Image: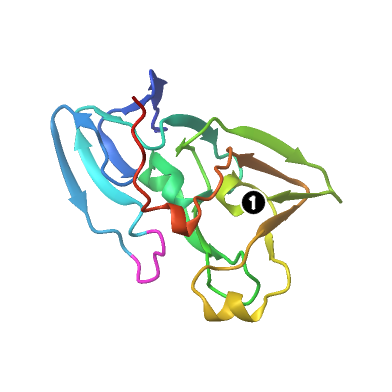
Amino acid sequence: MAQTVKVENGFAEVGEGAWLMGRAQPAAFFGSLSRRRRKGFFLRDRNDISLVELTGTARCANAVQPFLTHVSCGVPVYAVSSKVLLAPASAHTGTETIRTVPFSLMQALTASVFSSEWIVLATTSRTTRIAVEDGDTLSVRPGAVAAWTGNRPTGFCPKLGIWDILLPRGPKDLLLHFHGPCLVWIEGTAPAVPRFARNVPQRRCV
C-alpha cells in the first residue's frame, strides 16, 4: 500500500508507518515514535537521515530550510541527503558520493537514492525543475543542487593553484555538469561570507 503525505503551510504530515526523516524531525507528533537503526555498513547518509516507526501522525518542517518540494519517484531520484526532509522507508535504495572536485573528496556531496513512491525536499529557497534534453549539458553550482534523475553528474573546477592545496579553503567556482536526458531540481545560492568578516561585530545604528 502506497504511503501518502500532506504538504501544507510549510509542513509535511504523515501517518502511521516507517519513515525516513531529516535531522531534528519530526517537529511534532501524535501517538508514539521510535527510532530504529538503519541496516547497512556503507550508508553515507546515516548522519543526515534517520529511520523512525510511527503510530499516529507526525509533522515535519525545517526552520532553516523552510521551502518544501514534493518529488514523485517514478524513476530513481538522487537527492542531496542534507536536503531530504521526509520519505517512506521503502523508497530508499542506496547512497552515492558525488565528487565536485575530480579525483578528490573535497566538498563532495552525499546523495540518497529513492527508486519508488516520493520524497519531500527541504531547501533554503524555492526550487525549480529543469529538463535537460539528450545531448545538452546543464552546469549548476553544487550548493544549488537539490535532486536529479538520469546520468551521474561530473564535477568541474578551474586549475588548482598551490594555495588551493595548502590552505583549507577549497577551490573556487566549482560546478556540476548534468548531461541529458535528465531532470534537475535546483534552489537559489547565497554569496559566501568572507572569512575575515565572519567574526566582525556589527555596528549598531542609532
Q: Residue furthest right?
A: 135
Relative to 23, 1 lies left or right: right
On whether residue 83 falls in the magenta region, the answer is no
Residue tagged 1:
141
Residue 145 vertical placement versus 26 (above, below)? below
User: Which image quadrant is residue 161 in?
Assistant: bottom right
Which quadrant would residue 38 be assigned to in this image?
bottom left
Q: Residue furthest front?
A: 206
Q: Amino acid at mark 1?
A: Arg
What is the secondary structure assignment of the residue under circle 1? Answer: loop
* Residue at image location 58% in from the left, 38% down from the top: 188
Q: Nearer the viewer, residue 184 or 42?
A: 184
Quarter placement of the C terminus: top left
Looking at the picture, does residue 95 appear above or below residue 114?
below
Of residues 200 and 150, the one nearer the viewer is 200
Q: Please name the residue shown 45% across and 58% down the image.
A: 196
Name which residue lies at 61% across and 44% down. Answer: 75
- Going by the picture, which residue comes out furthest to the top? 9
Q: Is residue 42 above or below residue 122?
A: below
Closest to the observer: 165 or 71? 165
Q: Please name whichever residue, 24 or 87, is drawn nearer the observer in this view of the structure.
A: 24
x%, y% of residue 198?
41, 52
The magenta span reads 40-45
**Residue 56 in the image: x percent, y percent?**
19, 28
Residue located 41% across and 36% down the image: 65
Which SS type dominates the magenta stretch?
loop
Instruction: Tell me where residue 37 appears, x and y as whole percent.
Output: 24, 58
As drawn, 112 above or below 144 = below
Image coordinates for residue 186, horizontal then vertical, percent: 61, 40
Q: How many marks?
A: 1
